[in-house]
Image (tube, rainbow, N blue to C red):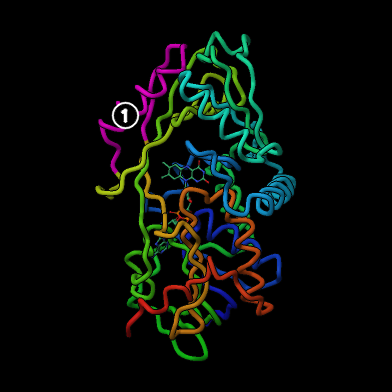
């Protein structure tokens, strides 16, 4: 019998960062990850952006979570000797005069000076990006190469014998007051970090997810050398020399993992409005975001099984939420720190019936 402190289910952004923090706190952890499943993390643009949307909404807790994630990812890069955290900032070229006026009014009304500034047309971008009306420049933004970071995590977990490429089979899981048993393993606690797949988890299928399918395209764009993320509702990230990712769509009514012709057409047509260079699509990817009805994470323990936990619901912002909330979860698990009510699944206990 193998004795552990924690079983973690899932090695996406959520499971990886939480498992890593538990290991650093000297806990014995084993991650089960079903490598045959498609995941949200593997197709994510990885963008972090403190000011989003048509109304220039400030990301929830931005002033706290952005400095926190910066510290976390930069020190992780050092430890893994890898480069996956890209602080490139983000440029939103105005699409038309009406939009320009709308954004000028909003920037006057809100105090977003730390993060946003209006910029004049930038002639050095003209060869690739239409920006004749200027645009908005967002600082503290950038992107994480999520696939690269997760493959670094996997090597780290494997080296420390914390990783098992296996689907957790619920029929083999036995939960008692004192411990969790799974095959030849006994653990004090289990934490589910399964992203969208939690909707099929018998312990947590009562929680109100509002999953959103999304698709991105990988494109060859000869001569594209802009490091900033360009965003006009749809975005371009330069991944490497001549290679970009375009994204992304939001679909709530057909939740499968298949790329579609309609998303290909929609993303291409939106990108072509501001990208002036020719491009060639080389691949298309689809994922399902673990988004929630109230747009807040799902963290905490099961209403009746007190050694069964969830860390999920990172929605559209897994990259910026995961480092901070994994730290909160660690405090909750190990030092009885109180979780903030907006993220604690206690808010849905009334939906649970035995
Ligand atoms: C098109 C698209 C674009 C996105 N862009 C961004 C972006 O720009 N910025 C951003 O911050 N976020 C973005 N996201 C959201 C981001 O992907 C998610 O917030 C994040 O990846 C969720 O991570 P997760 O670990 O909760 O879930 P997942 O990445 O889905 O991981 C779940 C893991 O659990 C495993 N698993 C499930 N069931 C079992 C089982 N029974 N046994 C073993 N393993 C199991 C799966 O194999 C998987 O590895 C995007 C998402 C999509 C789809």
Nearest the camera: 105 or 137?
Answer: 105
Nearest the camera: 126 or 23?
Answer: 126
Horizontal arrangement in the rendering, residue 271 relative to residue 322 (left or right): left
Question: Which residue is most to the bottom?
Answer: 177
- What segment is highlighted magenta in the picture? 258-284
Residue 158's x, y, as percent?
A: 58, 58
As displayed, is residue 221 above or below residue 228?
above
Q: Quadrant of residue 326?
A: bottom right
Horizontal arrangement in the rendering, residue 208 relative to residue 158 (left or right): left
Please name the residue shown 58% across and 42% down the image.
Answer: 48
Whether residue 262 appears in magenta in the rendering, the answer is yes
Residue 231's x, y, as percent?
A: 51, 28
Please name the residue shown 57% across and 53% down the image.
Answer: 60
As displayed, is residue 311 above or below residue 302?
above
Which residue matches tag 1? 264
Please name the residue shown 39% across and 59% down the image.
Answer: 293
As displayed, is residue 33 above or below residue 88?
below
Q: Is mark 1 within 8 Å of ligand 1?
A: no
Callout 1: few (<14), some (14-19), or many (20+) C-alpha neighbours within 10 Å? Answer: many
Secondary structure, mark 1, is helix
As displayed, is residue 135 above or below residue 72?
above
Q: Quadrant of the C terminus?
A: bottom left
Q: Quadrant of residue 220?
A: top left
Nearest the camera: 111 or 191?
Answer: 111
């Amino acid at each position: 019998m193998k004795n552990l402190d924690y079983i973690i289910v899932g090695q996406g952004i959520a499971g990886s960062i939480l498992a890593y923090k538990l290991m650093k706190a000297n806990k014995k952890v084993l991650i089960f990850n079903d490598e045959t499943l498609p995941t949200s993390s593997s197709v994510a643009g990885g963008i972090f952006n403190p000011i989003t949307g048509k109304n220039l909404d400030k990301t929830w807790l931005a002033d706290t979570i952005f400095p926190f994630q910066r510290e976390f990812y930069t020190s992780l890069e050092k430890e893994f000797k890898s480069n996956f955290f890209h602080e490139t900032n983000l440029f939103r070229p105005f699409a038309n005069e009406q939009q320009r006026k709308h954004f000028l009014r909003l920037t006057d009304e809100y105090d977003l000076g730390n993060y946003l500034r209006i910029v004049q047309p930038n002639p050095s971008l003209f060869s690739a990006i239409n920006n004749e009306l200027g645009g908005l420049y967002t600082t503290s933004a950038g992107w994480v190469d999520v696939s690269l970071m997760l493959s670094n995590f996997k090597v780290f977990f494997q080296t420390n014998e914390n990783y098992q490429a296996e689907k957790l089979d619920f029929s083999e899981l036995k939960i008692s007051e004192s411990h969790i048993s799974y095959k030849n393993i006994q653990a004090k606690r289990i934490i589910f970090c399964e992203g969208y797949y939690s909707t099929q988890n018998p312990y947590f299928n009562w929680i109100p997810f509002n999953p959103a399918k999304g698709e991105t395209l990988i494109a060859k764009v000869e001569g594209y050398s802009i490091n900033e993320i360009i965003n006009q509702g749809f975005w371009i990230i330069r991944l490497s020399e001549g290679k970009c990712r375009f994204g992304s769509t939001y679909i709530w009514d057909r939740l499968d993992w298949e790329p579609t012709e309609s998303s290909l057409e929609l993303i291409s047509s939106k990108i072509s409005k501001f990208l002036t260079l020719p491009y060639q699509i080389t691949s298309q990817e689809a994922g399902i975001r673990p988004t929630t009805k109230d747009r807040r994470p799902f963290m905490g323990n099961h209403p009746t099984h007190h050694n069964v936990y969830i860390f999920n619901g990172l929605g559209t912002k897994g990259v910026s939420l995961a480092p901070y909330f994994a730290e909160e979860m660690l405090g909750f698990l190990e030092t009885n720190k109180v979780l903030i009510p907006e993220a604690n699944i206690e808010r849905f206990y009334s939906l649970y019936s035995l």
